[in-house]
Amino acid sequence: MTRIERAARALCRFHKLPENTKFEGRPMWESYVDEAIAVIAAIDDEPKPGKSIENKRGTM
């Protein structure tokens, strides 16, 4: 299982949806692949130490 699949399945569980239920002919978790890719890309592109991140709650 790839990390994209693991992340997509985790997002599916987070939304309290069964991972393997068919949705539009495919397992439900596959509908979260784009979101999983975005999250993994964001994690892989961590800012350099000392660089701040802006979010809705302020600077981290």
Image (spheres, helix red, strand yellow):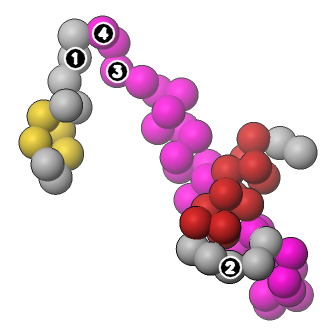
Callout 3 touching callout 4 (CB < 8 Å): yes
Give yes or no for contact between labels 3 and 2 (Cβ–Cβ under 8 Å): no
Q: Which mark is residue 17?
A: 2
| Magenta-highlighted residues | 20-49
Q: What kind of residue is marked 3?
A: Pro
Residue type, label 1: Lys
Asked if the residue under mark 3 is in contact with the one under mark 1, i.e. CB atoms within 8 Å, the reply is: yes
Q: CA distance from mark 2 to mark 4?
A: 37 Å
On the rendered image, what quadrant is the N terminus found in? top right
Q: Where is mark 4, residue-wise?
A: 49
Instruction: Determine whether the residue tagged by mark 3 lies in a helix, strand or loop.
Output: loop
Q: Which residue is mark 3?
A: 47
Camera-nearest residue between 8 and 41: 8
Asked whether residue 34 appears in the rendered view, the answer is no
Of pointers 3 and 2, the one earlier in the residue sequence: 2
Q: Quadrant of residue 27?
A: bottom right
Helix or strand or loop: what does disc 4 sit on? loop
Disc 4 residue type (three-letter): Pro
Q: Residues within 10 Å of mark 2 (few under 14, many from 20)?
A: some
In front: label 3 or label 2 = 2
Q: Is residue 42 left or right of residue 5?
A: left
Which disc is residue 51 wearing? 1
